[in-house]
Image (cartoon, grey):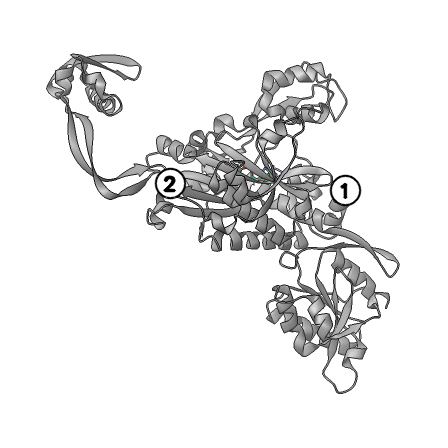
Amino acid sequence: MVGQQALTELAKRRGFFFGANEAYGGTAGFYTFGPEGAALKRNVESAWRERFTLRLGNEEIEAPTVMPEPVFEASGHLDGFDDMLIECAECGESHRADHLIEDAVADIEDAEALGVDRVEELIREHDLACPTCGAALSGEPVEDFNLMFETSIGPGSGQPGYLRPETAQGIFVEFPRLKEYARGQLPFGVTQIGPAYRNEISPRRGIIRVREFTQAELEQFIDPEEDEPPLEDVADVEVTLYPASEQNADDGDYIQTTIGEAIDEEIIGSPWVAYFLGVAQGWYERVGVDMDRFRFRQHLAGERAHYAADCWDAESEVGGNWIEIAGFAYRGDYDLRKHGEHSEDRFTVFKRYDEPKTVERATVNPDMSALGPEFGGAAGDVADALQELAESDPDAFDSNEVTVDVDGESYTIDTDVANFSVEEQTENGEHITPHVVEPSFGVGRTVYTLLDHAYSEDTVDDETRTYLSLAPEIAPTDVAVFPLVGDDDLVTTADDVADELRAAGLSVSYDDSGSIGRRYRRQDEIGTPFCVTVDHEGLEGDSEPTVTLRERDSASQLRISVADLAAELEAVLAGDGTFADLQDRYERVDTDVTTA
Ligand code: GAP
């Protein structure tokens, strides 16, 4: 297992990621992905897009990252997207109060669920000190701190806006248009990969908790009464589950089961959530997560976000700790209902019945010549309130008088004036608010997990070697090409080989600096699956030129003709063959040229 420090050092040395703005002292919570990291991250995003957008038949959008305040009033983020803040009076450092409790008190795993007052008490009871300067925190107030970055849209005082804290809101607010593209038919899914921003109180652990990060989210819109996921596709997928009931039990443990059994035994309540856990399990395995260090953990009741009816997290173990790398939430109709209530638009779909239905509709036809003189400017609102009452409580019109509330005022009307009646109407369908199921992936945390799980050490030529055993699909570079020495013939051939591999669509790195051993080590450390070396032996005589091909994890080599190289590598990288197959067909090279 690699420690966080060793991994962070490798990430910095080899250009995966490093703290941003270091020339200006750095900014906590912001990281730059260097050339290797950016390529790795792009590959993770492409693999996600292939699985969660293309193969599931979904559509991808790209919405703005700045959104106006009313969006977040509606979504609940303005009121409810808080973390617990405590500031040290001595050094001024800010800390997550709930994390301090969790770190200090063995049996508390979710201090946020306890509420601000209890967390203040616990800080006092356990006499907690500031992790930065050691001063006592007892007696310092704990506050709810909103995590959104505020900005102002336009010059002057402008319009208040916020950097989106989740890409999801960019999908929800566009629902009225997106449903048109889906021709009003449920179920349909919309994805988005892009940045999200949270003004984390104490960003920590490298890229694991940062203030700007990339999410890959899928919003699956469903009719909860009719739509079912294709469970047969994932029923046999084996998963490690850690349900809330097991977390709460004294002797609680993981449940090793299949998605099908987890539904049958009601361990996972929503078939849609279960379906996405099954798809995600396969995807994480494909991109190289070590499945022995992976689990799905259900949120405890107090842990769920304000919008979630149920939620399971995908968690990976890195550096000895479990971290959340994705969330799978059943958001119900919360988001679309709220945006429907707060905006002018319609966040519903029209659900057509198989057969038209004849229904009885309670209605009123108030006599405005009576309401007008009696209630003046409020008459129209009173008429609307009467109609609402007729629909929600028709029995209210059984007596001689009926009372409605408008803006907190009560208005009493003779029932005759309301002209209440129940009419038969033929209806072809109804407007329903779809429910949302949301797989939400953190791309940075996935990248971190892949690096951690790929980190390996062994001994080659009596030297300890560090290498990243990344899945070829994800590795930043497919193949590196080296001329053994700076000889003209070797350099020219190596250039040609690199060009040919690039033309075949592979991502190629060319390196002619330092000893060949050092060059192999560099590529091993960035996880390049294959290295090609052009040596004198391969250019001798009149026969076709050959090169050596070295596989990263085994460090073993074979000799292959330049003419075959691109096609064979393409096949192996695409999973249509293995290096071991090539070893059966090509001459093995026993001498490890790393010593050259
Ligand atoms: N739309 C749902 C949503 O945003 P979330 O659990 O808050 O749910 C989803 O975030 C994922 O985004 C997390 O599982 C995590 O991988 C990633 N994430 C959240 N906050 C993060 C942070 N401060 N730094 C890095 N990644 C973060």
The numbered dot on residue 3 is 1
List the residue tagged with mark 2. Answer: 223
Per the image, label 1 sits on a secondary structure element best described as loop
Q: Residue furthest bottom?
A: 542
- Which quadrant does ligand 1 occupy? top right
Q: Is residue 63 left or right of residue 562?
A: left
Circle nearer the N terminus (2, 1): 1
x and y percentages locating residue 407 in the rendered image: 30, 17
Picture coordinates of residue 77, whole percent (x, y) = 49, 30
Can the viewer see residue 268 in this picture? yes
- Amino acid marked by disc 1: Gly
Is 361 situated above or below 55? above
* Dot 2 and dot 1 residues touching (CB under 8 Å): no
Residue 108 drawn at (x, y percent): 66, 24
**Placement of 549 over or under 489, stated as above or below:** above
Q: Is residue 164 visible?
A: no
